[in-house]
Image (tube, rainbow, N blue to C red):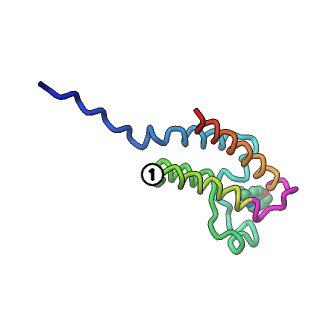
């Protein structure tokens, strides 16, 4: 009797699908513009000194595609790093600071919706 073919374990592609969807939503957000690519350390005086661990949505996407996130936690840590760096370097009432707060609120909402389902 042939045993039932073992179901292929869903590869990380499937496991991380929600993250890719969520990241695509972040990138498409109208307030995402300061966070889409790495801050050019030469064009932003002081950034290199103040921000120890720069992070941006493009870098997160690269890490996702290269399966560098071993668990949910590490993905969330990098996304929150984007917003924490923003709050650290930018005044709350600045253009970029305001965009960062709006993006963080959007992410927190979508993340809980994604998890609650
Ligand atoms: C997230 C963040 N935090 C602090 C500073 C910059 C950034 N984002 C970078 C991509 C950026 C945004 C706006 C910029 C800029 C660079 O180039 C200098 C000229 C003004 O326009």
Q: Is residue 51 left or right of residue 101?
A: left
- Quadrant (top left, top right, bottom left, bottom right) of the C terminus: top right
Horizontal and vertical percent position of residue 86:
74, 59
Q: Which range is magenta? A: 87-96
Vertical arrangement, residue 36 with respect to residue 21, above or below: below
Residue 89 belongs to the span the image colors magenta? yes
Dot 1 falls on a residue whose secondary structure is: loop
- Quadrant (top left, top right, bottom left, bottom right) of the N terminus: top left
Q: Residue furthest bottom?
A: 49
Residue for badge 1: 66
Residue under the image location 48 percent in, 53 percent down? 69
Residue 28 belongs to the span the image colors magenta? no
Horizontal and vertical percent position of residue 64:
50, 49
Q: Residue furthest left?
A: 1
Vertical arrangement, residue 61 with respect to residue 6, above or below: below
Horizontal and vertical percent position of residue 111:
63, 42
Vertical arrangement, residue 60 with respect to residue 51, above or below: above
Q: In terms of image quadrants, where is residue 2?
A: top left
Q: Is residue 11 left or right of residue 72?
A: left
Residue under the image location 22 percent in, 27 percent down? 4
Residue under the image location 79 percent in, 55 percent down? 96
Residue under the image location 76 percent in, 52 percent down? 100
């Amino acid at each position: 009797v042939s045993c039932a073919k073992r179901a292929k374990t869903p590869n990380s592609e499937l496991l991380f699908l929600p993250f890719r969807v969520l990241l695509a939503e972040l990138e498409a957000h109208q307030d995402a513009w300061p966070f889409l690519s790495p801050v050019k350390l030469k064009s932003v005086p002081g950034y290199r000194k103040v921000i120890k661990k720069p992070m941006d949505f493009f870098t997160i996407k690269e890490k996702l595609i290269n399966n560098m996130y071993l668990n949910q936690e590490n993905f969330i840590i990098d996304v929150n790093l984007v917003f924490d760096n923003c709050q650290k370097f930018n005044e709350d009432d600045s253009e970029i600071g305001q965009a960062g707060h709006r993006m963080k609120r959007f992410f927190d909402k979508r993340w809980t919706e994604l998890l609650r389902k």
